[in-house]
Amino acid sequence: MRSTDFELTTELLSTAYPFQRACAILRSKGFSVMASLPELQFIRTKDQTTLTIFAPIDQVMVSRNPSLSEINSIFRRHIITCKLRWRDLVDLQDGTELQSNLKGFKVNTTRSHDGVKINGVLVILSDMYHNNWLVVHGVGEILEDLKHKEQMPETPFGFDNEKEENTVSH
């Protein structure tokens, strides 16, 4: 196989299965519950919106034992529609709020002596995976907001043409 054939094959696979490499890394680092969700939720995503996923570690997902409908909600709470590498998170102003993929659920970033926290949950593994449109960080707990009344997105995968965009200047 020529190198151009390999590059074309790799490009086709990454287009057809855009989360494959990210999910493999998540599984290898103890985030397998969250790793199974992008493959299921975004199998039809073609526009490759830039994303950041805050993946809770398996232990908290397993101990929570969420129902199928709760898994969808949990997954959407942990996604924001902008790409935030670790250096971007560290540079955000304390208290910066970003809209998650779950309508009405905000993600609040703060810095402490321990590191960066998302809704009070520590980022325990930064930049676990990243490419030109996706970043995955590991977090130690499930992101919660007791004041939030969950609303499911109107489109099946939560991404539509009129979505609320997150913007971060670099």
Image (cartoon, grey):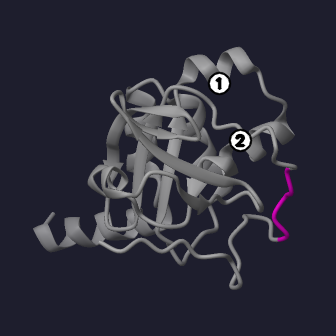
Q: Residue at x 51, y 50 (%)?
A: 53
**Does the segment drawn in magenta span residue 153?**
yes
| Magenta extent | 150-154
Dominant secondary structure of the residues highlighted in magenta in the image: loop
Does dot 2 land on a helix, a strand or a loop?
Answer: helix
Instruction: Residue 133: give x, y in percent of width and height.
Output: 39, 67
Q: Quadrant of residue 111?
A: top left
Residue 3: image location, x then y, percent: 12, 67
At x 53% / y 32%, what residue is drawn?
121
* Real-space Cα separation, disc 1 to disc 2, in angstroms: 9 Å
SS of the residue under disc 1: helix
**Residue at the spot 16% in from the left edge and 74% down from the top edge:** 4
N-terminal label among 1 and 2: 1
Callout 2: 10 Å neighbours few (<14), some, many (20+)? Answer: many
The residue beneath circle 1 is: 61
How far from the left and from the top, in percent, is residue 65? 76, 21
CB atoms at circles 1 and 2 under 8 Å apart?
A: yes
Circle 2 residue: 74
In this rendering, would 50 be left or right of 127? Answer: right
- Residue that sits furthest to the left in the current view: 3
Q: Is residue 21 above or below residue 158?
A: above
Q: In front here: 135 or 109?
A: 109
Q: What residue occupies the far bottom of the structure in this picture? A: 161
- The amino acid pointed to by label 2 is Ile
Residue 139 magenta-highlighted: no
From the viewer's perspective, is 14 left or right of 56? left
The dot on residue 2 is none
**Residue 123 appears left or right of 131:** right
Kindly indicate the quadrant of the structure image that contains residue 42: bottom right
Quadrant where the image shows the C terminus: bottom left
Total residue callouts: 2
Which kind of residue does numbered mark 1 sit on?
A: Met
